[in-house]
Image (cartoon, rainbow, N blue to C red):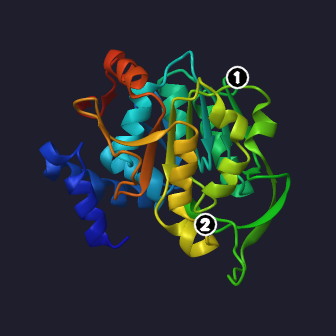
């Protein structure tokens, strides 16, 4: 992302609109301060949670600049998850969603990150938040069957399974397993799936989980990569999720309002799938507010 687009993103972020100048000053301070620091920085995030960050990390630095990098989806998770829930984070990277669900809201968690170097940083963030007894982390990929796949290893938040014809010098061969095999009867309340286009294989290996009545929400990255990179149809993903009883929604965090998309995809990259709107709306209406920077959300 160019500097202009980054500054535009920061200034127009929903949590910064009432303090645009302050947010841009904060951006400049981070740019200077992080470069003067001798190593990684421990950043105090939301309600006592923390993460370890280095300059240039797209996701975590976005959380620093804006409070919640992916505003609608992250706020939704904060409003819908609680201590009695199990949250499953597929493609967790260094763990921002796991931190929100398990450190901020007290849920139990399973998280999966295939790239070993990224997994080590995920484990650092689990330990710094004292989540080792609440979160099970796995250095594996999630797919439709047991085996191995080759991943890129040097692309930060966008590491992915290498498709036929793509060349990369920094790669790693990783074990992959179906989600149902690992969960073995555990029933999550919410899933987050961010696997850079391999969503179709994840869903094929999660049929038992997706049928579970306790699963009310799935946050899934759908931005066209699966079609371009692997030839998977996102329309088929929407049909598959409909077959499991899910429909698509947009979430407005300030009003805690769900807007139905009638099974269609939104234009923002992440899809929010909900099985029973009435159940979920009741949960989020009753949820306690969370302080994010200057805002009580």
Apparent side of residue 166 relative to residue 139 in the rendered image (left or right): left
Apparent side of residue 110 relative to residue 287 in the rendered image (left or right): right
Residue at the image point whose x is 56% and y is 15% from the top = 84
Residue at the image point whose x is 55% and y is 70% from the top = 227
Depth check: give the residue in front, 79 or 15.
79
Residue at the image point whose x is 40% and y is 54% from the top = 265
Residue identified by numbered label 2: 232
Apparent side of residue 152 relative to residue 23 in the rendered image (left or right): right
Residue at the image point whose x is 70% and y is 40% from the top = 207
Residue 175 in picture, x, y percent from top left: 83, 55
Q: Which mark is residue 133?
A: 1
Does residue 281 appear in the picture of this structure?
yes
Q: Residues within 10 Å of mark 1 (few under 14, many from 20)?
A: few
Residue 61 in picture, x, y percent from top left: 42, 53
Foreground label between 1 and 2: 2
SS for dot 1: loop
């Amino acid at each position: 992302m160019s500097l202009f687009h980054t500054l535009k993103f920061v200034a127009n972020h929903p949590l910064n609109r009432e303090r645009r100048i302050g947010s841009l000053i904060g951006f400049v301070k981070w740019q200077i301060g992080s470069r003067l620091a001798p190593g990684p920085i421990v950043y105090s995030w939301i309600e006592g949670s923390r993460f370890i960050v280095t300059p240039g990390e797209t996701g975590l630095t976005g959380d620093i600049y804006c409070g919640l990098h992916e505003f609608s989806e992250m706020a939704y998770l904060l409003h819908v998850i609680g201590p009695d829930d199990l949250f499953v984070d597929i493609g967790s990277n260094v763990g921002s969603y796991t931190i929100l669900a398990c450190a901020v809201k007290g849920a139990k968690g399973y998280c999966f990150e295939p790239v070993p170097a990224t997994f080590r940083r995920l484990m650092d963030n689990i330990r710094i938040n004292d989540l080792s007894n609440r979160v099970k982390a796995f250095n594996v990929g999630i797919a439709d069957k047991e085996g191995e796949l080759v991943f890129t290893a040097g692309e930060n938040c966008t590491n992915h399974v290498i498709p036929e014809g793509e060349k990369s010098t920094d790669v790693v061969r990783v074990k992959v397993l179906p989600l149902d095999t690992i969960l073995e009867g555990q029933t999550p309340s919410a899933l987050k799936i961010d696997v850079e286009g391999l969503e179709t294989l994840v869903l094929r290996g999660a049929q038992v989980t997706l049928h579970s009545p306790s699963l009310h929400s799935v946050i899934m990255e759908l931005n066209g990569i699966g079609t371009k990179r692997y030839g998977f149809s996102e329309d088929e993903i929407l049909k598959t999720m409909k077959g499991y009883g899910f429909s698509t929604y947009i979430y407005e965090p300030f009003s805690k309002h769900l807007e139905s998309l009638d099974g269609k995809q939104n234009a923002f990259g992440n899809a929010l799938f909900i099985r029973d709107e009435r159940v979920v709306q009741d949960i989020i209406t009753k949820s306690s507010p969370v302080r994010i920077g200057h805002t009580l959300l």
